[in-house]
């Protein structure tokens, strides 16, 4: 049995702005999604799991430990839309 790496999306006003970029930021700062992931997962495992699940290429994965678990900030490669994936998973 394969373990689930990506648990659920983490949605706040800040993460919503990171999807499209805010007017104050350059567009290069957008196109990001944030998820709560398993604490024992690596950046490589997160990237592979995301690409398989959402059929989108990942440019970079950053992680941070929070009180509610490990968070992965996933930046998509050019040509893939964080907003489109957000709509598919029901963030909007």
Image: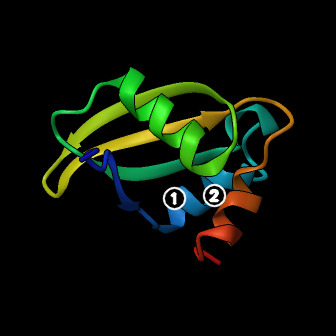
Q: Which residue is mark 2?
A: 17
Mark 2 residue element: helix
CB-based contact (under 8 Å), mark 1 and mark 2: yes
Residue sitting at x 55%, y 49%: 53
Q: Front-most of 3 and 6?
A: 3
What residue sits 76% from the left and 60% below the top?
84
| Horizontal relation, residue 55 to residue 47: left or right | right
Quarter that holds the C terminus: bottom right
Q: Is residue 63 left or right of residue 65?
A: right
Give x and y (percent) for residue 35: 41, 52
- Real-space CA distance between mark 1 and mark 2, rounded to the nearest whole angstrom: 5 Å
Number of marks: 2
Question: What is the number of the mark on residue 67?
Answer: none
Give the residue at the far front of this rendering: 1
From the image, tell me which residue sits under label 1.
Answer: 14
User: Does residue 37 lie above or below 17 as drawn?
Assistant: above
Q: Nearer the viewer, residue 37 or 26?
A: 37
Label 2 environment density (alpha carbons within 10 Å; few <14, some 14–19, many ≥20):
some
Write the residue at 42% across / 28% down.
62
Percent position of residue 43, x then y: 37, 24
83 is higher (above) or lower (below) than 1: below
- Please name whichever residue, 78 or 54, is drawn nearer the observer in this view of the structure: 54
Residue 42 position in % (x across, y down): 29, 25
What secondary structure is marked by label 1? helix
Q: Position of residue 20 (x, y in %)?
A: 74, 53
Give residue 25's quadrant in the image: top right
Query: Which class describes the residues within 10 Å of circle 1: few (<14), some (14-19), or many (20+)?
Result: few
Q: Is residue 29 left or right of residue 13?
A: right
The correct choice, above or below, for 23 with respect to 16 in the image is above
């Amino acid at each position: 049995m394969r373990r689930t790496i990506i648990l659920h999306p983490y949605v706040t006003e800040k993460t919503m702005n990171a999807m499209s970029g805010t007017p104050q930021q350059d567009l290069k700062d957008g196109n990001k999604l944030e998820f709560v992931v398993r604490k024992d997962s690596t950046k490589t495992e997160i990237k592979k799991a995301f690409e398989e699940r959402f059929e989108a290429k990942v440019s970079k994965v950053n992680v941070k430990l929070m009180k509610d678990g490990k968070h992965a900030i996933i930046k998509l490669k050019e040509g893939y839309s964080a907003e489109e994936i957000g709509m598919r998973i029901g963030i909007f």
